[in-house]
Amino acid sequence: MFNFESRGEWYATQNKCPHMQDMVLGRGLIGDQQGTPKVACPLHKKTFSLKDGKCLGDDDYTILTFPVRVVDGWGYVELPDEATTERLIGCDKLVPVPAAAE
């Protein structure tokens, strides 16, 4: 969740950067690109709109964004159910398996 304090706005996105599949967007830098609030991946500087998740560069990457509500100083994020989140974002489930001994 991002508090864009100078705009008085809150945003929430997935944490997984679609470029290199790293869980780092929560550590990204927020800013403004021609009026569009954005987050930049701290590793490779891919930038994404905090409003709709579109990549602000020439890439076809997108990220999920989620509605945020602030009530009595507490931020609430509306997330899809776990199965939907897994289907949309996924996670790396490839686990190395040792070869059978011969």
Image: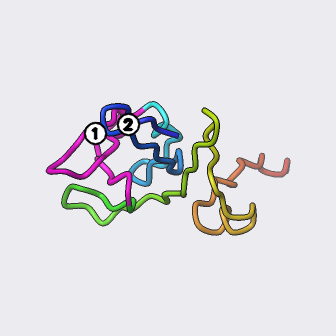
Callout 2 amino acid: Phe
What residue occupies the far left of the structure in this picture? 34
**Residue 74 spot, x, y in % from top left:** 64, 36
Label 2 residue SS: strand
**Can you say whether 80 is above or below 20 in the image?**
below
Image mark count: 2
| Numbered tag placed on residue 4 in the rendering | 2
> Residue 63 at x, y = what percent?
44, 58
Residue drawn at (39%, 59%) of the image: 53
Can you tell which of label 1 and label 2 is closer to the viewer? 2
Instruction: Give me the C-alpha separation between circle 1 and circle 2.
Output: 18 Å
33 drawn magenta:
yes
Dot 1 or dot 2: first in sequence order is: 2
Compared with 85, 70 (above or below) is above
- In front here: 89 or 39? 39
Labels 1 and 2 touching (C-beta < 8 A): no
Q: What span is in magenta?
A: 28-51
Q: Is residue 100 shown left or right of residue 17?
A: right
Quadrant in which residue 6 is drawn? top left
The colour scheme used here is rainbow
Residue at far front of view? 72
Task: Give the residue at x 74% y 64%.
Answer: 81
Residue 34 percent coordinates (x, y): 14, 50
Residue 100 as seen in the image, left or right of residue 46: right
Amino acid type, residue under disc 1 in the picture: Lys
Q: Splitting the image into 4 quarters, where does residue 90 fall?
A: bottom right
Residue carrying label 1: 45
